[in-house]
Image (spheres, coloured by chain):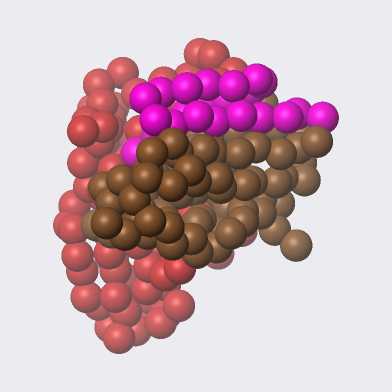
Chain colours: A brown, B red
């Protein structure tokens, strides 16, 4: 079982719909990241969370440390939001500040 | 634009060959991590370098090695290439000093081993 699990793996929606992507993890963490990866491969950091909720434009990220669960929401979705969204965590370990990634959620927004 | 660049963007090699991938980080970012992303999967941690020393390693064999240089550039070297090494290789740099680090990713190098 992976330390970070995302659901769904694939999501197709119509423009304007409210989108939710979920992430569950099984290890103690110091932070959780939501990342966006476009088809060319480049990864952009959207949020870094250690508690509560963050909002940036139409994107909202929440985390529940006790339940080891985070969600990424997109309001008023748009075709340009189509990308792979990846959840990643910083495990509480000594040494390397590595990231452990989920497998990603491929989001397609149709016009 | 993250300020992290990687070269080359694409590369084709044959099994058994050796490859060197390069990453140039932002000035002051003295930690660099390398990740391997197979098609359809999330990235996997290969190793991290901090101030030119290896600072942690994932579950990758010794034929994966790295170097970090004082000018914030780094290399990933893979010897004796295998077909399963075909993947997108990502580097990410960060500036340590707080427990919570934002990592800045390069665009990746896509390696195909035939």
User: Which residue is rendered at x = 66% and y = 54% of the image?
Assistant: A5
Q: Quadrant of residue B94?
A: top left
Residue farthest to the right?
A: A66
Most common secondary structure along the magenta stretch: strand
Q: In the image shown, does A35 or B97 lie closer to the viewer? A: A35
Q: In the image shown, does A86 or B27 lie closer to the viewer? A: A86
Q: Quadrant of residue A69?
A: top right
In this picture, residue A17 sits left or right of residue B57: left
User: Which residue is rendered at x = 45% and y = 39% of the image?
Assistant: A74
The spot of residue B36 in percent (x, y) is 44, 58
Determine if the magenta segment contains residue A67.
no
Q: Is residue B111 visible?
A: yes
In this picture, residue A22 sits left or right of residue A15: right
User: Which residue is rendered at x = 66% and y = 20% of the image?
Assistant: A51
The spot of residue A68 in percent (x, y) is 76, 37
Q: Is residue A91 visible?
A: no
**Residue B77 against residue A62 in the figure, above or below:** below
Determine if the magenta segment contains residue A57.
yes
Q: Which residues are magenta?
A: A44-66
């Amino acid at each position: 079982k992976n330390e970070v699990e995302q659901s769904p793996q694939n999501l197709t929606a119509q423009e304007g719909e409210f989108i939710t992507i979920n992430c569950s993890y099984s290890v103690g963490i110091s932070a959780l990241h939501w990342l966006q990866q476009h088809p060319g491969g480049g990864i952009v950091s959207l949020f870094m969370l250690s508690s509560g909720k963050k909002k940036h434009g139409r994107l909202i990220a929440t985390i529940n440390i006790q339940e080891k669960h985070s969600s990424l929401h997109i309001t008023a979705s748009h075709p340009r939001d189509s990308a792979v969204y990846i959840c990643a965590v910083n495990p509480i370990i000594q040494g390397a500040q590595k990231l452990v990634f989920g497998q990603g959620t491929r989001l397609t927004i149709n016009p | 634009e993250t300020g992290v660049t990687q070269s080359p963007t694409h590369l084709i090699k044959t099994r058994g060959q050796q490859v060197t991938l390069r990453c140039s980080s932002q000035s002051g970012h003295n930690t660099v991590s390398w990740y391997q992303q197979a098609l359809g999967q999330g990235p996997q941690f290969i190793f991290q370098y901090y101030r030119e020393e290896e600072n942690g390693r994932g579950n990758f064999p010794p034929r994966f090695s790295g170097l970090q240089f004082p000018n914030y550039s780094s290399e990933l070297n893979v010897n004796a290439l295998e077909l399963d090494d075909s993947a997108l290789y990502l580097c990410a740099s960060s500036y340590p000093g707080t427990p919570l680090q934002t990592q800045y990713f390069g665009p990746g190098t896509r390696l195909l081993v035939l």
